Image (spheres, grey):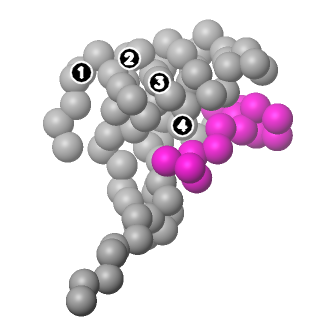
Amino acid sequence: YAVDRSQPVMLDKALQSGIPDSAPEAVERMLIEDAVLMPLIRIQPYAMLPEQLRGTGLIGTDRIDFSRSWQPQETPETP
């Protein structure tokens, strides 16, 4: 995937400045809507996140739940 060169810079700044306990949903929305996660390697039904998200301290109560975004879509049955 082609991405705007500013996206990794924006992600780096967000991760370096720290993520408030009250903001995981806002960060999740930023990552998904602004396509900061692209390119990602998608393996049904899981997605491997880019190297930039590893070791960010997003654990425990600060964990961002990406499962809602990466649920595999069911294909409708054709008659």
Q: Amino acid at mark 4?
A: Leu
- Residue 18 at x, y percent in the picture: 67, 15
For this orientation, the residue located farthest to the bottom is 79
- Residue 41 at x, y percent in the picture: 36, 56
Q: Earlier in the sequence, mark 4 or mark 2?
A: 2
Q: Earlier in the sequence, mark 4 or mark 1?
A: 1
Residue hosting label 3: 30
Report how far apart the C-alphas of labels 4 and 3 lie in the structure.
13 Å
Of the pair 70 and 76, the residue shown nearer to us: 76
For this orientation, the residue located farthest to the right is 61
User: Circle 3: is it few (<14), some (14-19), or many (20+) Cα within 10 Å?
Assistant: some
Check if mark 4's residue and mark 2's residue have beta carbons within 8 Å. Answer: no
Tell me, yes or no, whether the highlighted magenta stretch contains residue 67. Answer: yes
SS state under label 1: loop
- Residue 6 at x, y percent in the picture: 29, 16
Q: In this picture, is 20 found above or below 43?
A: above
Residue hosting label 4: 53
Mark 3 or mark 2, whichever is nearer to me? 3
Of the pair 20 and 54, the residue shown nearer to us: 20
Give the quarter of the image for residue 17. top right
In this picture, which residue range is highlighted in magenta? 56-69
Report how far apart the C-alphas of labels 3 and 2 lie in the structure.
13 Å
Report how far apart the C-alphas of labels 3 and 1 lie in the structure.
16 Å
SS state under label 3: helix
> Predominant secondary structure in magenta?
loop
Which residue is drawn at the image coordinates 78% and 20% (left, top)?
A: 21
Report how far apart the C-alphas of labels 4 and 2 lie in the structure.
13 Å
Which residue is drawn at the image coordinates 39% and 29% (left, top)?
A: 33
